[in-house]
Structure formats: C-alpha cells, structure tokens
Amino acid sequence: MNTVAHQILVQPTVSSRLLELDLQNLSFGQVFSDHMFLAEYHDGQWQSAQIIPYGPLPMTPATSVLHYGQAVFEGMKAYKSPIGQPLLFRPQANYQRINQSAQRLCMPPVPEDLFMAGLLELVRLDADWIPNQSNTALYIRPIYFANEETIGLRPATRYQLAMIACPVGSYYADPVKLLVSQNYVRACVGGTGAAKVAGNYAASLRADQEAQAQGYDNVLWLDAIHRKYIEECGTMNLAFVMDQVVITPPLSGTILPGITRDSVLTLFRDLGLEVEERLISIDEVVAADRAGILKEAFGMGTAATIAPISQISYQGQDMRLPPATEFQYANLVLDKLEAIKTARVPDPYGWVMKL
Ligand SMILES: *Cc1c(COP(=O)(O)O)cnc(C)c1O
C-alpha cells in the first residue's frame, strides 16, 4: 500500500480482470474496472479515502439509505487522446452537481479536492480500461449515500462516497422511440427533478416499463401541472429543430441541468446557430410535425451523448421523424463534441482535463 496526495490510500489489485474484457462487445454498465474509490463521512469529517479492488461494500439492513433513500449519483466519461492520454470531460461540472444534488437531500458537501483526487487517481490507475474505439468510453459513476445504521427518519450522520468505472459502448443501438406519458409525471416544482437523486429513477421505472411493453424505448415526460410542456426523457435532456431553430426546454427546476445539454447549446451558439431555451408544448411539436417544419429531435446526456429520436407518440398518434442520417444539427454537434472530448481538435472551452 502507498499513500498519494490528499491521503488516499491506494491498494492496487493483485489480479487485474482486464484481459477478460471483450472490447468488441461492450454493453452499458455490466462490467466494472479493477478498482473503486471510497471515502466516508462521519463524526463531522471526511475520512478513510481509499482506492481498493472493486468489490462489495458491507452494510446492514438498518443502513439508512435503504429506508429513506438519501442517495445521489453522477455520470461522466473518460476518453483517450490520439496519443493514448487519459482525458476527462468537464469533471468539475459533475463535482458541482453532485453537491447541488446532495444539498437537496440534506447531505454534507463533498470537498472538491477529495472528489477530484479520488476521481483522477481512479482513472489513472484504471486507464487501461478506457476503450478507444469510436462510441466507447470509460463511464465513471460516483455515488453518494447515507450509511448510518438507523431507521430514524432524519438526515443521516454517516455517509459513503464511492466511484466505480465501467467501459461502455453505445447506450442505444438505434434511434429512440418515445411515448409521451399521460399517466405519470417525473418531477414537479419544489420536488427533486433538478437533482440527480436515485429515487427519481425508481419512480420513473413503471412508466418506462409500460412504454417498453408498447414497443417504445422510453417515456417523454410532460410537466406535472399543465401536463403540456415538454420536460425531458429518462436520462436525457431533449432538443427539437424546427425550421432552422434549435429549441430546448428551460432549466425551470424540474429538469436535470445536463452537462451535455449545456455543451451542445454552447457549441450551437458558437457556430452562429439560433438556439431558444423556452417552454415548448407537446401541441407545438405536433403542429410543427403537421406543418413539416419538425426536422430533428434528439436527446442529450453523458451516457447516450446525442441520441436521435425516430418517433414520438402522443395520445395514440405517432409522429415520425426523418432518418437520423438526415439530422444535420444533431450530427454536426455530435461530431464536434466527440472530437473535443477525445482531443482530436483544440478545446477552446477548457472542457477537457488531461491526466
Ligand atoms: C444525467 C441526466 C441527464 C443528462 O445529464 P448529463 O450531465 O448531460 O449527463 C438528463 N436528464 C436526467 C434525468 C439525468 O439523470
């Protein structure tokens, strides 16, 4: 064992599983890299920061997260540059967001040096797990949850931070088909929709399952009050291209402030394209489809990057979008974003962190 900066104890594995990795058949979230980062918060302090071989965490059935769900997470990707240097895309944005999510659930803030040191050390140690074919990456999943042994309902006094990593391929094999949910809502004003809170996803599973039973991939969520304005879909923010304008719902407090969304809007604006962040009703999308000006619809998120949408169903009517190969805006921004993330073009934004 040896100690690196910020007192992270590093215990490297003695038996790497890297050779078992099938790079040609990467699915999403099934295979985990050799190591994981752990840190604990108790007695009012962060402690026991360590990187150890990936494996189970001990806990009892009284662990508070299992009862009241104080759990938040993040998702980011590591890539390799053309010369094989490990790269992270906007990790500080994930750091800031995990603390915004934590704050919503009364969890103590994670110190920046702890988060960044753990992240960088984990990615360095498991750098050989970063695949470098197109559409692949090492997905890093920080999780942060209450692990006090109590079933009393109150913010816990003990927490666990962990980071695990998985080499991943494409999230969706094909363009995505969305069903507008009429029976369920994802988030409401004053709720937790803007935080990456585990419970949001548990609450969404039923609607997704019903959509999948009807042949759709995911649900398109409408706002909880008017049941009219488009919010987002499962793990992605949404954008539409109508005529020559990119339109996306505003960050109103009920949708997740996506880092991909922010990056895409920045790139579009800097390309001189027209971008509108505003309320967009499902009726407006239906009308645009009828008028023939709905050119593109796509999801934006770290896992899927840019996911073209082929179909949206609302009240029994299917809107079909042009083939994804004809999506000029989505393909343009996808190429640009991937080139920046893999350091194949200069990064004028300071988004890429080289390790
Ligand atoms: C994570 C997530 C997104 C996308 O955020 P990114 O930072 O781009 O990965 C969008 N919507 C929801 C609900 C999410 O959980």
Image (cartoon, helix red, strand yellow):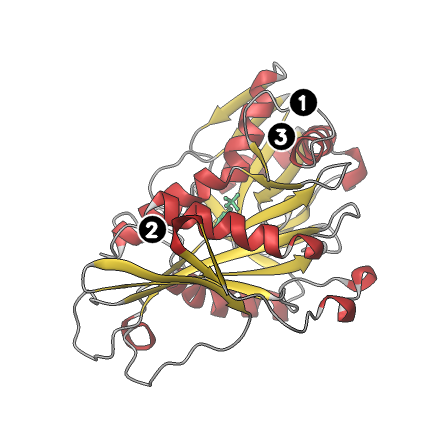
How many angstroms separate mark 2 from mark 3 (CA)? 30 Å
Q: Please, what is the three-letter code of the amino acid marked with disc 1? A: Pro
For this orientation, the residue located farthest to the bottom is 61
For this orientation, the residue located farthest to the right is 24
Residue 211 lies, in percent from the top left, at 58, 64
Question: What quarter of the picture does the C terminus occupy?
Answer: top right
Which residue appears at 42% of the width and 33% of the height? Answer: 250
**Vertical relation: 51 (above or below) 190:** below
Which residue appears at 69% of the width and 35% of the height? Answer: 334
Residue 15 lies, in percent from the top left, at 67, 73
Mark 2 or mark 3, which is nearer to you? 2
How many angstroms separate mark 2 from mark 1 (CA)? 32 Å
Task: Return the residue at label 1.
Answer: 346
Task: Return the residue at label 2.
Answer: 101
Q: Is residue 270 left or right of residue 114?
A: right
Task: Return the residue at label 3.
Answer: 241
Q: Please, what is the three-letter code of the amino acid marked with disc 3? A: Val
Which residue appears at 52% of the width and 47% of the height? Answer: 120
Asked if one can make out residue 227 in the rendered structure from this viewpoint, the answer is: no
Residue 151 lies, in percent from the top left, at 21, 80
For this orientation, the residue located farthest to the top is 272
Q: Sequence order check: which comes first, mark 2 or mark 3?
A: 2
Determine whether the beta carbon of the residue marked 3 sits less than 8 angstroms from the nearest atom of ligand 1.
Answer: no
Residue 132 lies, in percent from the top left, at 76, 47
Q: Is residue 75 left or right of residue 340?
A: left
